[in-house]
Image (cartoon, grey):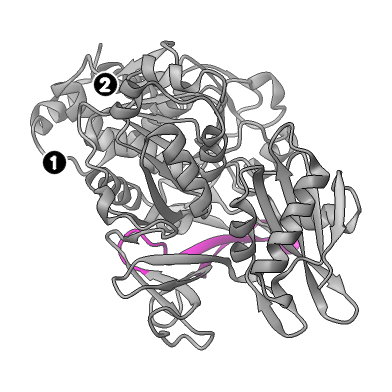
Amino acid sequence: MTISTEDADLAHLACGMTAGSVRELLAVRACNTPERPAFSSAGGGRELTYGALAALSGQWKAALRTARLPLEARIGLWIDEPLDFIGTYLSCLAAGVTVVPFNPDAPVEDVERNARRLRLDLVATDRPERLKSGTVWHIQAGRPQIAVGPGRGPTSNHAGHRASVLLLTSGTTGEPKIVPLPEWHLLHRAQLVAAHHRLGAADRGYSSLPLFHVNAQVVAVLATLVAGSTLVTERRFHRTGFWDRMAADRITWINAVPAILAILAGGPRPDPATADRVRFARSASAPLSEAVLERFEERCGVRVLETYGMTEAAGQITANPLDPEHRRPGSAGLPVGIQLRVVDKDGRPVAVGARGLVEIRGAGVIDHYLVHSEPSNESIELRIPALNRGGWLPTGDLGHLDHDGYVFLSGRSDDVINCGGEKVYPREVEDLLRTDARVADAVLVGQADPVLGQCPVAVVARVEDTEPALLASDLIEMCVSRLSRAKRPRRLIVVDHLPTGSMGKVSRRLVERQLTSSSVGLLETHALVS
């Protein structure tokens, strides 16, 4: 391992001290535990020790200096292999440049369009042959190997919008907004995650969640670095042999989403020693139904830690207490290092137990978005305020608080279905449908109705080998007996699979479009008779 004189001095000073930056953290870990694995591939593949990670960071720093890239340079990461992404991501943060992670499955046209729109100075990728324009660095084993394509040079000036990471929102209602996250936001949240989850040097986490999302970056990668522990990662979740891999890699906690927990709840059981070793399975990204939680815990013998977060807060907002006796099924937990309130449409706090709009405030919450406009064919980057007059960030989520401050989420405010003037909240119906063990997942969407304005339609994904007609009939009977008239789906559709996004969350908008175009691929459709 080789470290520059400057980095060696930093490592000497940082040993045993609390680090306030990624660069300092890498130096501390390289000094104290250079041989400890920081990140490794599931199943005993490659690994990056803390010493190797610090050395890699030094190589990136030298390469960026040689390229004469300024501190305000922006580097896109379009990297498929998880360890290569992690090494590049941390190295760039340590060097002080801004990184823009891309979905490794994104079409090349989307990557090149966003590279131009965000005025990136270069794109680091392990597939350079696919990119046709701009400056491209080829990543092999996490290292910048070669440059291809015409060199553009650092033509951008982003000094007014300095951030360590830029993340794109989903853009389901228009052009995606850009979330600028400073390094201290990211580390602040990572430190809160590590402390709340009681992560220590002996922990070995597992995450197969996509690394271009804030969850994996903060909860998995940066929290591991903060704690000085180890993270085992893989490109995608694989149900086959899952618990065998958890046993072989001695996993102590799992970073998951409800879709993964639902699959595991219907699969093989782990051996008792593996189940005892795993302290918790963390659930994020989407609300977790109590039915899935109970099936997973009963089947796998591992406790679930339900949480709630968003990109604009650099990850985690709330989490259930780590002690099992204080967790509340169906709740996303308590605020962690952040203020949270529930308000009505006029911004006034609602009573305990009353449903309203969730707002957050505090350290690590962004105060602006970045957007682009293009007058006269020239892209201009603008700052758009994210906070309201009281300094609160509207999350777009609906929910309520109980008397102890636990948060219960109802869904997104724009998902509410207005059926003849009566509001229908999809999660209530979806959770009821998921109580049937033959239901892999469910989504309730609104469909235009000439009389009622909208009517609820349920689309249910069946567990493999389930008889669709019988399932539909049983679900209809359950809805009629347990739901009020307005909440009963007017149609119930059984399918093999529901369309999902990169985090495994059902894409409600795509389901709506498929229903409109009659391309949902239904097996059985039944109208509910009121």
Q: Is residue 388 magenta?
A: no
Query: Which label sits on residue 50?
Result: 2
Badge 1 marks a residue whose secondary structure is loop
- Magenta span: 361-385
Q: Position of residue 401 (x, y in %)?
A: 39, 73
Q: Is residue 113 positioned above or below 390 on the image?
A: above
User: Would residue 60 be found to the left or right of residue 156 on screen?
Assistant: left
Q: Residues within 10 Å of mark 1 (few under 14, many from 20)?
A: few
Q: In the figure, 514 relative to 60: above or below? A: below
Number of the label disc, if any, that sits on residue 18: 1
Query: As shown in the figure, which amino acid type bears the numbered disc 2?
Result: Tyr
Q: Label 1 sits on what residue type?
A: Thr
Q: Nearer the viewer, residue 69 or 254?
A: 254
Of 444 and 368, nearer the camera is 444
Name which of mark 1 and mark 2 comes first in the sequence: 1
Q: How many residues crowd mark 2 within 10 Å: few (<14), some (14–19), many (20+)? A: many
Rendering coords of residue 141 (x, y %): 46, 14
> From the viewer's perspective, is residue 63 above or below residue 119?
above
Q: Is residue 261 visible?
A: yes
Q: Left of 6 or right of it: where is 391?
A: right
Figure check: 142 above or below 526: above
